Every structure is written in structure tokens, then in C-alpha cells.
Image (tube, rainbow, N blue to C red):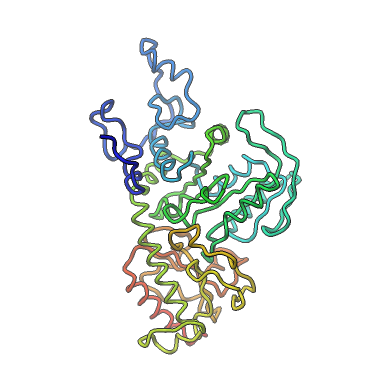
Amino acid sequence: MTLPTAGFQTRLLHADHPDAQREPNYPLAPSMSLSTTFHVPHPDFKEEHEAYLNPPENSQDTKIHVYSRYTHDTMARTEQVLTSLLGANALTYSSGLNAIISVLNHYAPSVIAIRNGYQGTHASIELYTRGRDVRIIDLDDEYPKVETTPTTDGSGVKIGGLLVWLETPLNPTGEARDIAHYAKRAHEVGGYLGVDSTFAPPPLQDPFKQGADIVMHSATKYMGGHSDLLAGVVAVKDVKEFNRLWHDRTYLGTRPGGLELYLLLRSLRTLGIRVARQSENAEKLAKWLHSLTEEGEPSPETPQEITGGRVVRYVWHTTLQPRDGKNDPRGYCEGKDFDPSSQMTGGPPTFSFWLRSEAAARILGQKTTYFQAATSLGGVESLLEHRWASNRTENPHVCRISTGIEDFEDLRADLQQAFVNVASLS
């Protein structure tokens, strides 16, 4: 009997498994490939020798390798799982920023539409624009129809046009943007839509379903999940476009190392379980934090000195959308015209809140026990960051939470005692 299509978590565990008929004794935990070069098969092994002399450009299951910058077993298995996970042809990179740069080089846009988001993305765009005539416009500006040049590599990519870069959910607030809306606007003028979906990995969000042309993840975060590797991922639906990205990665030398790929593959096995728990914890925390604001309704046992907006002024999270933005201390809001549940199956595990006191925001992470005062996000442990410390363009009242897999009640109690501790600073 033929098995039905495998589910999400099953594919994470088995998408890269070798064929037992060909490899009857394969290891369940894949080996880590560290070799940079591989032995040439003897000409008597005609099939293997031919494959070595004419290696497939992008085969994720080739057993014949030439040089690790092209392919090797650990990279092939990792990208097999990622391709199954994302429902698109996936490549790995040495970091999330490297993945962003690869997208910029891939489309070579002369106009980039973007607003806010991760400061590293803006720094990468600044590097890309050096010596180039590139115009940066706001995400909601009118999109120009720009003349493009078809590439000659058979990929069908047109370079030199418009790239709309959409980060959703947004760093650091965790609010969602309407992917379908921006896809429609970009495509109407012949542009491309790139989505940074780092804050909402599968199974929370699939930007391709809403019309994204290319999807990027910082695999350092949820895909890695253990705060011990740097990697990036880019995925596209069309295999010819994938070939172009593969070629660029090969000759820019931007693939991850063997150890990072091994750690990433290990982490992908539990992605679904980890993210589900992190998302659930984050939704509960966001609702509890919102109950402490002026708009909220705290439970009777909550210490009075931290309720009514005395400590927490505002909370951002997709579960609190849509909003009109009237009470947003930044003076604007994200996603006020759509319900994020239309494109997400759960809220992001990372989000932010605004403290009444800047002094309290600076010290809060030092008053917690389970929340670690550190930057980054996506690990199994919960982090609480005074965002200004990592991004000086951010308001110093903002703290960002990366929710881990601890017991929710312990996380809530930890934040509550920390709020009580800093209440006198508000």
C-alpha cells in the first residue's frame, strides 16, 4: 500500500532518509561531513565517474561529490528537509544576513520598498546600494513600474526592477503585515515580493500561499532553536530560479560550514514541537501582559502596583490585532486592516512591550530568573532584551521577549516578580 502524504512533523523526521533498499545499514543520526574534497571514482564505475565529471547543479540527493562548496552529504540532507518543510526549493547560507544579501543580488533591484524591521536588513541594503543607483521607498508609497532586464541564464528572473521587502511578523514588535496585499501591489507593476518570515517559521506561516516570490529565514533563530549556530535559508518555488541562487552561492562561497549544517539538521527534527510550545506560551504571555495595561482587565490576584498601566503601557502581538493604533506609543500601527489569523496558524513566539519607565526597561532583564537578559531569539530558553541595547534606533522603553519552552506559569511568575521589583521606577 502507498502511504498518504506525510504530515508536517513526520516530514521533518523522515524527508531526508536514505533508501533502505540502496543503503540497508544507514545511520539514523546523519554523519557530519567535514571533508572539503572527494576522491574521483575510477572510470570502471561509469555512472559514478560520469556524475563526478558532470555533477548536477542542484541535486539534493546526489551521492557523488566533488568539492564541499558545491555539495556534500550533510548539506544535501539538510536542504532536503528544508525543501519539504517550506514546500519550495531551499538553500542554506552562512547567516541570515547572508541570505538577505543573496536575495538582493538575485533580483538586483533598482527600487526597494521597505519599512522598519530588523536593523541588520537595512545595513545589508546599505551595503548593496554602495556604488549603485538604488532608490529606497516606503512600503506604502506608490510603487513605480521600473524597466527590467531579463537574465540570460534561463532562470526567467528579471533584474533591475522593484523588490518589495516585507518582514512579517515584524521585528521587534511581533505584529503581522498583510502578505497578500503587498504581493498584489508588487506584481501589478512587475515587481517581486520577498518575505522575511523568521518570526513565524512553519507551521505558523507559509508566505508562498499569499503570493510571495521568495522567502527568507534566519535559521539562527527558530530553525536552529538552541542558540548555538548561525545560518540562513532562502526558498523559491521555481527550480530554474533555484539554480541561479545555487550558482551564485557556489561562486560567492556563502554556504554554511559542516558543523552548522549538522546542528541545523539536528534542530529541524523538533521544529514543529518547539515552535508550537513557544507560540502557545507567547500568546498567553501577551494576553497576560496586556491585562496589566490601562486597557486590560487583570486577575484579582495580580499585585495592584503593576496593574492599570503603572508599569506596562502597551503590548504588541498578532493576537492583539487588528488595531487602530490610537494608543500605540510609537504613533502608528501595523496590520490595522486585516486579521493576522488569515495568514498565520498561531502567534509569533517573539514580541515586545513598552514599559512606562525607561529606567525600568533598562534593568528589567536583570531582575528575572528564567528569562535571560540577552539578544537574539528562537532558542528553547526564554530571553528578555532591552531592545535599545542592540538597536539604538529603537525606543529605550521597549523590551522584547523571545519565548522559550518553559512552563508558562513559571514564566508569568518570573515577569510578575520582576515588575513588582521595578514598579517604584515607573
Q: Is residue 306 left or right of residue 99?
A: left
Q: Is residue 182 left or right of residue 201?
A: right
The residue nearer to you, when weighing 131 against 322, is 322
Q: Which image quarter: residue 331?
A: bottom right
Q: Position of residue 210 (x, y in %)?
A: 54, 51
Residue furthest left in the image: 25
Q: Count the marks: how many?
A: 0
Residue furthest bottom in the image: 304
> Where is 13 relative to 301, above or below?
above
Q: Position of residue 74 (x, y in %)?
A: 38, 36
Q: Position of residue 264 (x, y in %)?
A: 39, 46
The residue sitting at 56% across, 48% down in the picture is 212
The residue nearer to you, when weighing 246 against 186, is 186
Residue furthest front in the image: 1
Q: Which image quarter: residue 116?
A: bottom right
> Where is 119 relative to 147, above or below?
below
The residue sitting at 62% across, 39% down in the picture is 106
Q: Which image quarter: residue 167?
A: bottom right
Residue furthest top in the image: 44
Which quadrant, please, contains the N terminus? top left
The residue nearer to you, when weighing 80 against 413, is 80
Q: Is residue 366 left or right of residue 355?
A: left
Q: Position of residue 143 (x, y in %)?
A: 72, 52
